[in-house]
Image: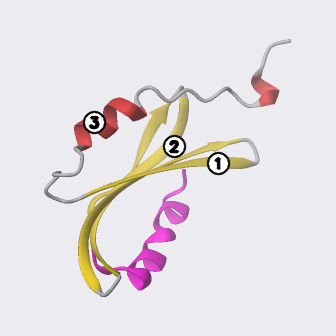
Amino acid sequence: MQRRSRAAILPILQRALKDVEVVQPASDITISGLKGAYMRMNYTAQMEGRQVAGTSELWIVPRGDYFFMMGAGTRPDEKTGTRAEIQKIVATVRIDPSPAARKP
């Protein structure tokens, strides 16, 4: 993915969430043989009158004229789920190649 399009989401998130910290900047990844991008960030969200710390991971995988966007969220201390658990799940994701790439 182009660096410009990878960075475009950050200003939107910074307006919506408090204290956004990019822990892992957008980087190239491959999921199910397709190239995409991954990023991870920590933030504070206002929820029902209280502040909640969170960590979000985001995977974006283009496919033809659209893209798949997968996200996962945990607490920064990983008490509600670990990044290792999330990585195991993401490793199982299978995306069919675009229709143009399929063999008849």
Which is the main secondary structure of the residues drawn in magenta? helix
Q: Is residue 76 found left or right of 22 in the rendered image? A: left
Q: Please state which of residues 28 and 68 is positioned toward the viewer in this rendering.
A: 68
Pointer 3 residue = 85
Question: Which amino acid, by three-letter code, is at mark 3?
Answer: Glu
Residue drawn 76% across the image and 24% down it? 101
Q: Please state which of residues 79 and 29 is positioned toward the viewer in this rendering.
A: 79
Q: Nearer the viewer, mark 2 or mark 1?
A: 1
Whether residue 17 is in magenta: the answer is yes
Regarding mark 3 in the picture, which secondary structure is present there? helix
Q: Position of residue 98 (x, y in %)?
A: 74, 31
The part of the chain drawn in magenta is: 1-21
Q: Are marks 2 and 3 in contact (CB under 8 Å)?
A: no
Regarding mark 1 in the picture, which secondary structure is present there? strand
Q: Which quadrant would residue 75 be assigned to in this image?
A: bottom left
Question: Which amino acid, by three-letter code, is at mark 1?
Answer: Phe
Residue drawn 50% across the image and 30% down it? 93
Q: Position of residue 33 (x, y in %)?
A: 54, 26
Cα distance in 3D space between marks 2 and 3: 20 Å
Q: Is residue 51 found left or right of 60 in the rendered image? A: left
Q: Please state which of residues 12 and 5 is positioned toward the viewer in this rendering.
A: 12
Crowding at dot 2, Cα within 10 Å, few <14 / some 14-19 / many 20+, comes out as many
Label placed on residue 67: 1
Label placed on residue 36: 2
Specify the farthest residue to the front. 48
Cα distance in 3D space between marks 2 and 1: 9 Å
